[in-house]
Image (cartoon, grey):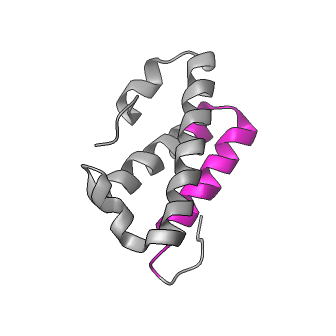
Amino acid sequence: MVPGPGPASLPAMSGRSLLVVAADKLRNARAILGDHQLLGEALYDRFRGGKDGTLWHYRAIADRQIESGPPALAVELNRIVAALEAAGTGRGQDR
């Protein structure tokens, strides 16, 4: 599991809290994507949830942000998460 607020806690958060979570997760997702370009799939060994758990976590938060987060941050977070999901699969972004 990835530390910090998880998808289940997001519905109870205020708009200001959602903004902070979105900005934090966007920064983290960008770092993970950059690390993936350097390390490949091995980067997921550092996360307790592994690749599947980490991608699920970020996808759930990105989806929640699209529903009610700040629009520009939500769109960018969704774009980066889609790139993470596509990385290593040989597929382009489909979201």
Q: Quadrant of the C terminus?
A: bottom right
> Vertically, is 87 above or below 67?
below
| Residue in the picture at 68% in, 49% down | 76
Residue 66 position within the rendered picture, expressed as x and y whole percent measured from the top left: 61, 41
**In the picture, residue 37 is in which quadrant?**
bottom right
Residue visible at 58% across and 71% down in the picture? 94
Viewed as shown, does residue 48 lie left or right of 6?
A: left
Provide the residue span drawn in magenta. Answer: 65-89
Relative height, residue 89 to residue 27 (above, below) = below
**Residue 2 at what x, y percent from top left?**
34, 41
Q: Nearer the viewer, residue 91 or 44?
A: 44
Q: Is residue 66 above or below residue 34?
A: above
- Most distant residue in the right direction: 72
Q: Residue furthest left?
A: 48
Q: Residue at x 34, y 61 (%)?
A: 44
User: What secondary structure prevails in the magenta region?
Assistant: helix
- x then y, percent, for residue 78: 60, 52
**Quadrant hosting residue 18:** top right
Whether residue 88 appears in magenta in the rendering, the answer is yes
Question: Where, quadrant-wise, is the N terminus in this rendering?
Answer: top left
Left or right for 77, reference 7: right
Q: Which residue is painted at 69% across and 40% down in the image? A: 73
Q: Position of residue 33 (x, y in %)?
A: 54, 61
